Amino acid sequence: MTRTGIHTVFTIRALLARFLGDSHYRRWVAAVRDCGFDAVSLDVIWEMAEKRRGRFDFSLADSLVEPVVSAGLSVQLKLNSRLHPEWIRGVAQLLCGGARPRCRETFDRPVHTFADEALTRRICDFYHHAVRHFAGLPVISYQPMFSFAFESEYEFYEYADYSVAARRQYSRWLRQRYHTVEALNAHWGARLKKWPDKMPIDFHGDSPRPGAPDCRPRFVDFMKYREDSLRGFMHSLARAVRETDAGAAFCAQVGRIYSPCAARRGTPGVFRWGADADEIIVDPNPADDIGFAVDAARPSGKLCSVEMDGPLAYHRNLTGPAGRHYVTHASAAARHGAQRLYFANFSGPRDFSNYARHLAEAIQTFRDNRRTVRPAHAVYISKAAVYAFHEREIPCYHMPPEREPVDIISDDLIAASPDLVARYKNVEAPFAPVVGRAAAHLVRDFCPGDLFDEYGKPIP
């Protein structure tokens, strides 16, 4: 259950707050409240909470949550398993053991695997203890946080994961799908002599024909598997939260929902792997169409939220004062039907104070312009097409900035609600002829010409 009446949230990273010290941190929280925010988002770090296996200490998180609640604000808690305790390496498989060299050299802590059952059980235990510890406080939602960008999806730099646990899980997934090695060979054009215990995962995003859609069965199956792997992991986390607090809200956060790195992140599949979430937070780049990001998340029927990046990102990606862009983007988010607005990645109190006036204006603008949106027109973007073209520009569908809201619908939304398409007067399908087979019969009237499924096979 999501808490109502909470419209604006300011994010403070736990390690930054710890570095500031108590008095400076409390003054910052007071400034956030005075600016007009309803809540503060904080991360609860697994590494700090369970330094010794089975012994939990939430004193760091308590020192950050208490000033927020005392200031009359609600809190969102991001349960951060990316920063995991050192002892976990002796208990479970981590991605860094099987990742490519580039991954290991660039990031000292790659995202952990979702496929190791022992690791998942330990993370769920962390969730149980955290939710129980903060029960009774005004927590608006719990969000899993495990990617490099502090989101709930795969990394943006890698088609992960390649761990031993993932290869075993992938082998079991394929066996459930094809049953025999002969059937798998026929579909893949492979020559396996027996079913491997650990299926090799050698795909790294290299299309065999540059510029053409990648419809290789081996690639398509891998993308389906990795969605199912993340879905199972997220389901376990959601269950851990709700078993501990039946009224708690569970949240999923994604980055640029249709971007050149969307295939690697797995972002277009959020409505499948994030099916257990009550709230979806989209985190567009400052240069992105904010309205498009909202239009893509809103049709799910979940609480639709937008996170705006810090001033550095706005200066890097846009011209003109960052503060004015905050106001403009808050207005666009409200006009397109966003229900909650997050601000993140401010470097400290001084950075915040430089933009306090604009943030207050953005908050008021968002509150004044919030509305319920039910568009009569939709744009169908095939998840299969986004994946098939890897990081090409096909996912970046550009629309006039001052347009009225439309619903951006996907294969997963159509599969979850077969009557969805009937709501609209018109559905545009800009990336046909590659469409999802499940959605083909529903969008046929709007897609003239031949249609092909994710495997490149014609759809009658």
Image (cartoon, grey):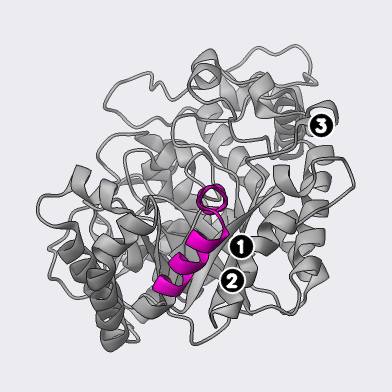
N-terminal of the pair, mark 3 or mark 1, is 1
Q: On the rendered structure, is 355 left or right of 409?
A: left
Q: Residues within 10 Å of mark 3 (few under 14, many from 20)?
A: few
**Disc 2 to disc 3, C-alpha distance:** 31 Å
- Mark closer to the observer (2, 3): 2
Q: Locate residue 380: give its quadrant.
A: bottom left
State the quadrant of the N terminus: bottom right
Tally of numbered tags: 3
| Amino acid found under the numbered disc labelled 1 | Leu
Residue shown at 74%/57% (left/top)?
59
Looking at the image, the residue that sits furthest to the right is 54
| Amino acid found under the numbered disc labelled 2 | Pro
Residue shown at 66%/62% (left/top)?
63
Residue shown at 66%/20% (left/top)?
98
Q: Secondary structure at mark 3?
A: helix
- The answer, for residue 140, to whether it is visible in the render is yes
Q: On the rendered structure, is 124 left or right of 452?
A: right
Reading the image, the residue beneath label 2 is 67
Reading the image, the residue beneath label 3 is 87
Looking at the rendering, the stretch of residues picked out in magenta corresponds to: 14-32
Q: Is 361 or 67 nearer to us in this picture?
A: 67
Reading the image, the residue beneath label 1 is 64
